[in-house]
Image (tube, grey):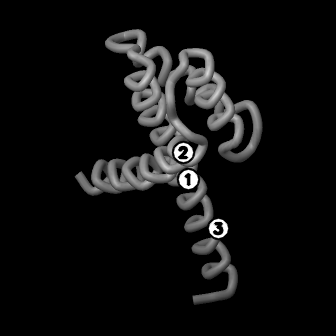
Amino acid sequence: MTFEDRQKGVERKFALDEELRFKSNARRNKLLGLWAAEKMGITGEDAQAYAREVVIADLAEPGDEDVFRKIRADFDAKGVDQSDHQIRRAMSDLLGEAVTQIETESKG
């Protein structure tokens, strides 16, 4: 195996890792949107639409703060009693669930 072969392998792994990170974050945001919708009493197609809004909110800037701010503002507007810690905990837990779902789907 040459240095170039190893380099190409590293580049492929990096690309796959980035793709997994992107898919995981998008899936997490959808799950987070559904979780938040439930907390706000939003159901059915409206909950799905809200989840899409959360996914789109993540495109505003790098990182998770844009998503956090959207959920925080929406909870505040609706009078939902969830602390910043509870929202961040849901974000973390749902990211783990999203990764598990994606890994399971890729094996199946």
Q: Which residue is mark 1?
A: 21
Label 1 SS: helix
Q: Residue drawn 63% across and 37% down?
A: 68
Residue at the far left: name it.
Answer: 108
Label 2 SS: helix
Q: Which residue is mark 2?
A: 25
Rendered-image quadrant of the N terminus: bottom right
Q: Amino acid at mark 2?
A: Asn
Q: Residue drawn 74% across and 44% down?
A: 62
Quick check: marks 1 and 3 in contact, CB under 8 Å? Answer: no
- The residue lying toward the viewer, choosing from 23 and 63, is 63
User: CA–CA distance between discs 1 and 3?
Assistant: 15 Å
For label 2, count other residues whose C-alpha is less than 10 Å away and answer few (under 14), some (14-19) or many (20+).
Answer: many
Q: Amino acid at mark 1?
A: Arg
Numbered mark located on residue 11 in the image? 3
Residue at the far right: name it.
Answer: 61
Above or below, 8 against 68 in this view is below
Labels 2, 3: front one:
2
Above or below, 85 against 1 in this view is above
Quick check: marks 1 and 2 in contact, CB under 8 Å? Answer: yes
Residue 76 pos. (x, y %): 61, 23
Q: Residue drawn 62% across and 26% down?
A: 56
Picture quadrant of residue 42: top left
Residue 82 pos. (x, y %): 51, 35
Q: Amino acid at mark 3?
A: Glu
